[in-house]
Amino acid sequence: MSDFWIIVKKEIKDLLRNKQIIFGMIILPLILFPALGQMMQIGIEQAQEETKVVLVNFDKGEYGSLLVKSLEIAPNVTVTQIQAKDLQEAIKKAGEKDYNVVVVIPSDFSQKISSNEKTYVEVYAIFKGISAGMREGMSEGRINAVVQVLNEYLAKLKIEQNVQGDPEAILKPIEAKSYSIIKGRIVEVPPSVVSGIIFSQAFSIPLVLFIMITYVSQMAATTMAAEKENKTLETLLTLPVKRITIIAGKMIGTAGVALISSIAYMIGMKYYIGSLTPQTSEIGISLEDLGLSITPKGAFLFALSLFLAIVFALSISMLLSVFAEDVRSATTLVSMSIMPLLFPSFILMFADLETLPTAIKSILLALPFTHPILASRAMLMQQYSQMYFGIAYLSVITLITLYITAKFFSTEKVLTAKLKFGKRKRGRA
Amino acid sequence: MPAVRVEKLEKDYGKVKALKGISFEVKEGEIFGLIGPNGAGKSTTLRILATLLFPTAGKAEVFGKDVVKQADNVRKLISYLPEEAGAYKNLTGYEYLEFMAKLYAKTGKSVEEMLELGKEISDLGNRLYDKVSTYSKGMTRKLLLARALMVKPRLAILDEPASGLDIINAYSIRQTIKSFARNEGVTFLVSSHNMLEVEFLCDKVALINEGVIIEIGSPRELKEKYEAKNLEEVFMRAIRVSAGGE
């Protein structure tokens, strides 16, 4: 064997025996990306579900009925025609059941088409939560497609009949005016635009949280394991300082640095996401315009939820890193443990919690890191009771973890605990 | 009241019995040495007294305070230098001493006093203002010894204080300990496998082997008893006697 191959062989052997490389660079991508794809699939499948339309027809003429029939035979569209006095009543009725679109045909619909004037049909997409907004966007698209088919049919008919008049009204007699309904309120912004705005929210919060928690836990693992690796832990534990003070000091110090790094990351992400979705800023629509405003109470509850999640991450990472002998194995151990707790919440990027199967929903609710994401959405929707539940749950598991960590640090286990992947090592005499 | 009282102390690591019921006392102001080969149980004894490990059975007290039940009180009286200790690499030597001084001192004045003493003991001159990561092993050990002693503890527990150091650094550390004990009246409990070091330093020694104390006395008494030239010979003869007696 040549020197070159001897070196290559040694490199491969050396790298493949490194658990961090095996986990982080081989196993993780093999699990992470297919799982992410699977989660996206759930969101797409949900978006592709039937568009359930509540239809209010104020028109008594033939074209109103034609539109109703066209919608009824359209694929993936279920139409329920209701009687309503006005739009508000229709929206209320639609909101009571699982409808996601309200279509309103005005009373002069047929008359305008007959007199070769332009008319319109109102399409209201009901936003139930803040996930990617794919479902609402797709529903709008389906209705538009039906309107377009009808337009083409009518245009053909009018051209055949050699009708004279406004070419625009002849070629495209029906216009679909799209609106969004958020928290029961009509917002004069098409669902596709709302989806765009919500999309960046739905994506950025879980992503920022993911990065923040990963940073926090890696830092906590590093700070604790570095004490072991640099042989400073024993000295630290014999100082006239309470163990709980040592843990708290380390946690707050770590959280402070993690906060700085998170802010740096968020600033970077803001520009990155901003460059991906320029249309929202160009049309000048903000979350406030959609009725999704943040109140001081909401912001406080969200911050509390985030803080508890960070304390939980810090606490569990410190506890886990005690079992590692050096920084490298500590960060691997912490990644392996935090990732399964963190990653499932990515599903919320693509799907709403309420629309998920009960089993998945229960798992997500049991995971601590789901709650700040839900809190960020509840904050925008001003659904505070949901936030209280999340905070109560997070408080309980964070306190339990803190208690276990504090207990653990007051025993000798903090020095003697070792998690060996291979054979067990004896204690030193 | 003795500075240290250890009674029938036992410590098991799973099936391994590191200490098999040792007893000894250290008087206040004394330099007491625990000597024995690697794995004899020296570090375990010192770590129990430093409140890091819990005994499986028996009792250990520092100035009458139980190391398990009154661990917080014991930590106020002791200063412990582990065998394999390090300092925070990204701090300068001075910052490291300052950090430690602030945890011990209650007033600004005593922090200053501790730092002055720390500077003197470490004998690192201007290198004290360099990062610890740039220090040699000997310099780090001097810094750590300065940290342990500058707080003027009532009991200094030093595990192999000069282990792995060259002759010049080891000599300097031994001199520091001896003069500090003489001038400040601090009680020292020192472990070592270097018999010559212990003979030079200690007023009294306990010979420990396989978790059992086989002999206690002053170096002179022990040398006379075993008709030996030095403690190394004492140790080998004592082992033979204890093995023969079993």
Image (cartoon, grey):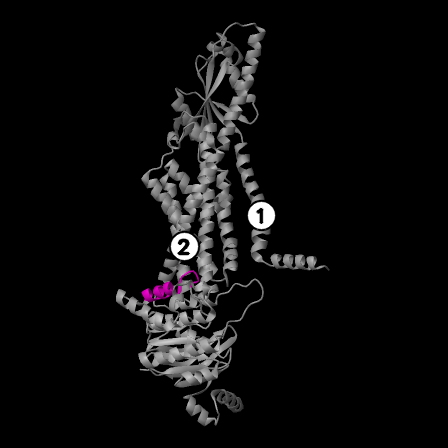
Residue at 33% of width from left, 82% of height from top?
A: B182
The part of the image, by quadrant, that contains residue B148 is bottom left
- Residue B93: say if magenta: yes
Label 2 neighbour load within 10 Å: few <14, some 14-19, many 20+: many
The part of the image, by quadrant, that contains residue B191 is bottom left
Residues A364 and A425: in front is A425
Magenta residues: mostly which secondary structure?
helix
**Residue A117 % position (x, y):** 47, 10
**Residue B145 % position (x, y):** 40, 72
Residue occupied by mark 1: A29
- Residue B104: say if magenta: no
Q: Chain of mark 2?
A: A
Residues A327 and B128: in front is B128
Amino acid type at image mark 1: Pro
Above/below status of A283 relative to B196: above
Residue occupied by mark 2: A254
